[in-house]
Image (cartoon, rainbow, N blue to C red):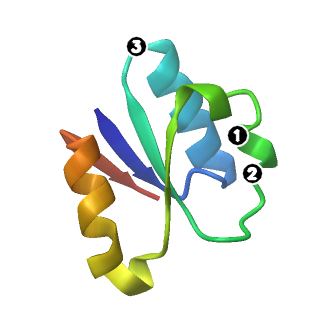
Amino acid sequence: RIFVTGATGFLGSYLVADLLDEGHEVAVLLRPGSDRWRLHDSLSRIEIVEGSLDDVGALRAPLARFRPEAVAHL
């Protein structure tokens, strides 16, 4: 169970795909209105946490539900 920030970027999108291919459960932080085209092939296999690191308090509940074992902050 891995939580990824920066998943819509070049490196982040490849990391998400690799983690999924290795069998990990993945949640990604997506800012409202972010362009998701790089995640198109992965969207049905990931959990999306809408929000921003500018408001960490709003991320507490979704992260508590997902219960990540690791974080990849890109």
* Secondary structure of the residue carrying numbered label 1: helix
Amino acid type at image mark 1: Leu
Q: Would you name the residue on which mark 1 appears?
A: 39
Q: Which amino acid does label 2 sit on?
A: Arg
> Which residue in the protein does label 2 denote?
36
User: 25 left or right of 34?
Assistant: left
Find numbered disc 3 in the image and state the secondary structure of the residue it sits on.
loop
Q: Are marks 2 and 1 in contact (CB under 8 Å)?
A: yes
Q: Residue at x 23, y 42 (%)?
A: 68
Q: Earlier in the sequence, mark 2 or mark 3?
A: 3
In which quadrant is the N terminus drawn?
A: top left
Query: What is the distance, in whole Å, between disc 1 and disc 3 at their CAs?
Result: 17 Å
Q: What residue type is labelled 3?
A: Gly
Label 2 to label 1: alpha-carbon separation: 5 Å
Front residue of 38/27: it is: 27
- Figure check: 15 above or below 54: above
- Which of the two discs, 1 and 3, labels the residue nearer the N terminus? 3
Q: Please determine whether, in this image, residue 45 is positioned above or below residue 14.
A: above
Which class describes the residues within 10 Å of circle 3: few (<14), some (14-19), or many (20+)?
few
Q: Mark 3 points at which residue?
A: 23
Q: Quadrant of residue 53?
A: bottom left
10 Å neighbourhood of mark 1: few (<14), some, or many (≥20)? many
- Residue 46 location in percent, x, y? 52, 34
